[in-house]
Image (cartoon, rainbow, N blue to C red):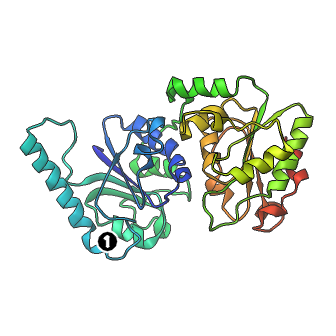
């Protein structure tokens, strides 16, 4: 397996963070392979998440929202072949030696989404092996025992090998993030809150009043509430400060603005309480105890896979997609 391509159609930071374990496990198993990422959106591993040191190259075919346009079916293969020819020409002109493999085909394509159109288009890229859960795994180039949502286990069966699980290690963060987190949260008596959602198209937010009342109860237990909210959310920050004058907003007092700092700060918490959002995934990388509230989104699919997590899913508890059917008491009794 010299060249492995991973395709993901999700565009959020959380979508990319969810791939950490899969990528790290594959890289640890196929140590000499080149890994490429193709997404419908930008490669966050080389952007906002670069401080986590997940080394995966971008396969840039010049097709924005790859897979979400039917006409991509007509050009995907040609764009890939042209990209390979361009790289060979660059090598010839510059006469630079490179450890990179020839980009003529992929040895393995891993399709991590299940939209039929996207899979059909992705399948046009030249390859030897193709793995996809789409249409009941019918696009896989090998028949094997597959289970929905268990990609690493499926890939072990698909490749007839045993791929061990390698999770993100907090030690891989640069020391500056850990030192800054310790400066901002010097003690170990904190409970973190993440309550704002990035995706505005789904009602994933639990009531701000509930969050504040919960924080007040936590203060009564001699714990310090720590809020992870953007500095620009002035109205929300002021609303919280009016009820919780001793609440902390550590990111507002740092010159570092990075998801890596959020993860480092999370490692200083006794517990984190969050809705389904990007910060939830950043906190999950610290592998701390968490309580996560879900409403319309799928908790089985999106909840962090960590050692100590308690999930409150309104669909399970109250047979409702309304996250605000979850009560203050429901959450507090889990603390």
Residue 313 image offset from top left, x and y in percent: 76, 58
Residue 248 image offset from top left, x and y in percent: 74, 36
Quadrant in the picture for the C terminus: top right
Q: Is residue 241 left or right of residue 333?
A: left
**Could you say which is closer to the camera, residue 64 or residue 24?**
64
- Please give the name of the residue rendered at 83% of the width and 39% of the height, measured from the top-left corner: 245
Q: Is residue 93 left or right of residue 319?
A: left
Residue 272 image offset from top left, x and y in percent: 73, 40
Q: Residue furthest bottom?
A: 70
**Could you say which is closer to the camera, residue 79 or residue 243?**
243
Q: Quadrant of residue 185?
A: top right
Is 180 situated above or below 277? above
Quadrant in the picture for the N terminus: top left
Residue highlighted by disc 1: 72
Q: Crowding at label 1, few (<14), some or many (≥20) Cα neighbours within 10 Å? A: many
Q: Is residue 215 visible?
A: yes
Exactly how many numbered labels are in the figure?
1
- Please give the name of the residue rendered at 8% of the width and 38% of the height, measured from the top-left corner: 95
Disc 1 is placed on an element classified as helix
Q: Is residue 191 left or right of residue 55?
A: right
Is 286 situated above or below 292? above
- Please give the name of the residue rendered at 39% of the width and 48% of the height, measured from the top-left corner: 159
Residue 117 image offset from top left, x and y in percent: 41, 73
**Could you say which is closer to the camera, residue 194 or residue 167?**
194
**Could you say which is closer to the camera, residue 231 or residue 199?**
231
Q: Is residue 162 visible?
A: no
């Amino acid at each position: 397996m010299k060249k492995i391509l991973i395709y993901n159609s999700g565009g959020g930071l959380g979508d990319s963070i969810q791939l950490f374990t899969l990528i790290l496990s594959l890289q640890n198993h196929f140590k000499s392979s080149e890994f490429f990422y193709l997404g419908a959106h930008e490669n966050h591993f080389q952007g906002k998440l670069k401080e986590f040191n997940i080394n995966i190259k971008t396969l840039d075919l010049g097709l924005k929202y790859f897979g979400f346009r039917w006409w991509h079916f007509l050009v995907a293969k040609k764009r890939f072949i042209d990209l390979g020819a361009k790289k060979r020409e660059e090598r010839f002109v510059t006469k630079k030696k490179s450890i990179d493999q020839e980009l003529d085909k992929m040895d393995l394509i891993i399709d991590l989404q299940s939209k039929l159109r996207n899979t059909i288009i992705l399948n046009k890229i030249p390859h030897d092996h193709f793995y996809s859960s789409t249409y009941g795994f019918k696009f896989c180039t090998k028949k094997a025992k597959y289970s929905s949502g268990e990609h690493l286990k499926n890939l072990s069966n698909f490749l007839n090998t045993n791929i061990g699980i390698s999770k993100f290690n907090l030690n891989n963060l640069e020391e500056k993030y850990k030192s800054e987190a310790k400066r901002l949260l010097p003690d170990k008596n904190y409970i973190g809150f993440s309550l704002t959602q990035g995706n505005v198209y789904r009602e994933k937010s639990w009531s701000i009043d509930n969050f504040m009342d919960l924080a007040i109860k936590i203060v009564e237990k001699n714990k310090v509430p720590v809020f992870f909210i953007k500095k620009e959310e002035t109205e929300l920050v002021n609303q919280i400060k009016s009820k919780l004058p001793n609440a902390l907003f550590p990111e507002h007092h740092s010159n570092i603005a990075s998801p890596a700092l959020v993860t480092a700060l999370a490692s200083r918490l006794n517990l984190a309480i969050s809705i389904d959002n990007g910060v939830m995934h950043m906190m999950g990388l610290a592998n701390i105890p968490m309580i996560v509230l879900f409403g319309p989104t799928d908790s089985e699919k999106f909840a962090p896979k960590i050692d100590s997590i308690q999930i409150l899913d309104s669909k399970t508890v109250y047979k409702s997609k309304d996250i605000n059917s979850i009560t203050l008491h429901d959450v507090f009794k889990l603390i």
